[in-house]
Image (tube, rainbow, N blue to C red):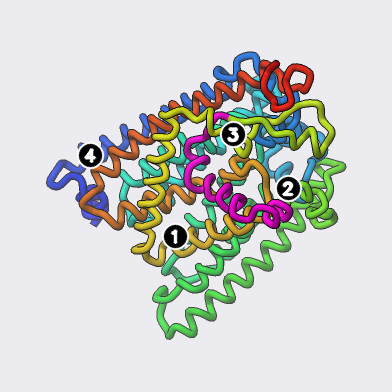
């Protein structure tokens, strides 16, 4: 049974080969892939920035709030923006404090925060592999391809190299979907109630919008319990509804308890339910943009789901911080990227990425019920960010990995005779994306080091 279980995922590529040889091969590929990811993340975090002070001017890099996040993740000071990240201080800060103390002797909060977000992004790569493995019914090659594409995409390189909360929330986007896949078809047991509640705390605790993933996964779990045990469908359905209800009740109680504990451990940290999140996020609502330019606004968001989160253009300059907050420096922006700065190689890479996404969307037409929950989650993220957010690459980790897992798995399932070509194309795409994204990040750090303040630039953001 075990032998056959491992042979089936490998059969589409290799038939009749020694099982032990190919298990060893996949272990080697796994080690090489994640060794490469660790090396790249270390390079973009600690080598590529050079002398650029990335935390000097708040939100100047794609609206990333680096200064605030570093304090939140690595200090014992009170938490900030709990209306958006309700339990981030409690869940993550103890790890960041220990990292800073153990690795840097307590003298480098920025370095500790970089290590922390890189570790979370690496964990996300593992989770994306697991999700793709589930969606393909146990295909290891597809799982590794999805993990590689996700890891070397621009959104992941950015999230792994500069401290922001989105890198943490990426994990919260994937865990409930993997847990759903593991429990589909099983009876809703008592210990599963506890696990669902704990997953809910992680989701809402890291970023409040990620509770949507948990809710979707839990509701789909209720609907897919059938066949788990004896009795008619009505009995099974009642068991699932009861289990989900208990999970929600336990989640609410534990969340309230965790919020109170956080307030005591980190005095001054406000409870998220006592604040007004809409008021604080007002500048990031896109209602005026939708009303003035609905088509352009929609295309901009679609551009991230289809191209920019994979391979970014060179950044442009936005006066958002100057205009809305009165700061004396520009911010780097994907939304303000200039077409005349896009190279021929970047046009070619964008076309290749767009073709890959189009093929994945075409393959999704043949997708089975396993894709329902991740598909609903992606749709919910698109709907949310249609109305909310600037510089969508900042939020891309919330959806990007799940999106990649869906696209790769859909192609793998839809075209079984083209799987070798899919793996080759994935490898070539990863190399091309990595080269482009390293060049773009290098330009980001060069612009930061050259200075983003008004006095050294003209009215369009270019150096005088």
| Residue bearing the label numbered 3 | 337
Task: Say few, some or many: other residues with alpha carbon within 10 Å of mark 2 (under 14 / 14 to 19 / 20 or more).
Answer: some
| Residue bearing the label numbered 1 | 181
x and y, in percent, of residue 236 in the image: 48, 79
Callout 2: SS: helix
Q: Nearer the viewer, mark 2 or mark 4?
A: 2
Residue depicted at x 69% and y 51%:
289
C-alpha span from label 1 to label 4: 26 Å
| Residue bearing the label numbered 4 | 22
Task: Say few, some or many: other residues with alpha carbon within 10 Å of mark 4 (under 14 / 14 to 19 / 20 or more).
Answer: some
Reply yes or no: does residue 326 show up in magenta: no
C-alpha span from label 3 to label 1: 39 Å
Magenta segment, principal secondary structure?
A: helix
Q: Are marks 3 and 4 in contact (CB under 8 Å)?
A: no
Q: Which residues are magenta?
A: 286-314
The earlier-in-sequence mark between 2 and 4 is: 4
Callout 4: SS: helix
Q: Residue furthest left?
A: 16
The earlier-in-sequence mark between 2 and 3 is: 2
Q: Nearer the viewer, residue 97 or 62?
A: 62
Callout 3: SS: loop
Quarter-of-image position of residue 23:
top left
């Amino acid at each position: 049974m075990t032998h056959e279980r491992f042979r089936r995922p490998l059969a589409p590529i290799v038939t009749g080969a020694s099982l032990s040889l190919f298990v060893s091969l996949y272990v080697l590929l796994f080690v090489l892939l994640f060794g490469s990811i660790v090396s790249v993340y270390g390079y973009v975090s600690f080598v590529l920035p050079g002398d650029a002070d990335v935390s000097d001017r708040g939100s100047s890099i794609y609206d990333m709030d680096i200064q605030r996040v570093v304090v939140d993740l690595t200090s014992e000071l009170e938490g900030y923006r709990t209306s958006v990240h309700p339990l981030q201080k409690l869940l993550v800060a103890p790890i960041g404090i220990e990292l800073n103390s153990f690795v840097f002797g307590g003298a480098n909060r920025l370095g500790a925060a970089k290590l922390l977000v890189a570790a979370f992004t690496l964990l996300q790569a593992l989770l994306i592999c697991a999700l793709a493995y589930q969606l393909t019914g146990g295909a290891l090659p597809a799982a590794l391809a999805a993990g590689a594409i996700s890891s070397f995409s621009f959104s992941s390189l950015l999230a792994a190299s500069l401290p922001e909360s989105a890198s943490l929330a990426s994990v919260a986007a994937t865990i409930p979907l993997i847990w759903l896949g593991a429990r589909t078809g099983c009876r809703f047991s008592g210990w599963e109630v506890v696990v669902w509640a704990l997953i809910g705390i992680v989701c809402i605790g890291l970023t409040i919008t990620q509770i949507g993933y948990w809710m979707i996964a839990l509701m789909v779990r209720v609907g897919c319990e059938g066949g788990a045990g004896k009795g008619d469908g009505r009995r099974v359905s009642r068991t699932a509804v009861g289990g989900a209800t208990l999970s929600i009740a336990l989640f609410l109680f534990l969340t309230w308890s965790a919020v109170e504990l956080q307030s005591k451990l980190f005095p001054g940290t406000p409870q998220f339910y006592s604040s007004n999140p809409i008021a604080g996020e007002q500048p990031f609502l896109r209602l005026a943009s939708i009303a003035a330019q609905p088509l352009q606004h929609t295309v901009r968001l679609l551009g991230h789901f289809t191209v920019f989160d994979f391979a970014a253009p060179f950044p442009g300059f936005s006066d958002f911080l100057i205009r809305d907050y009165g700061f004396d420096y520009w911010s780097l922006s994907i939304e303000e990227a200039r077409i005349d700065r896009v190279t021929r190689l970047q046009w070619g890479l964008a076309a290749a990425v767009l073709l890959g996404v189009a093929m994945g969307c075409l393959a999704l037409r043949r997708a089975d019920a396993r894709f329902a929950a991740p598909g609903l989650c992606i749709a919910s993220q698109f709907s949310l960010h249609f109305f909310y957010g600037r510089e969508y690459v900042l939020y891309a980790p919330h959806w990007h990995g799940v999106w990649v897992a869906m696209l790769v798995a859909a192609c793998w399932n839809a075209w079984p005779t083209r799987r070798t070509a899919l793996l080759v194309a994935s490898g070539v795409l990863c190399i091309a994306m990595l080269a482009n994204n390293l060049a773009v990040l290098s330009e980001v750090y060069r612009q930061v080091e050259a200075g983003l303040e008004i006095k050294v630039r003209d009215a369009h953001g270019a150096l005088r």
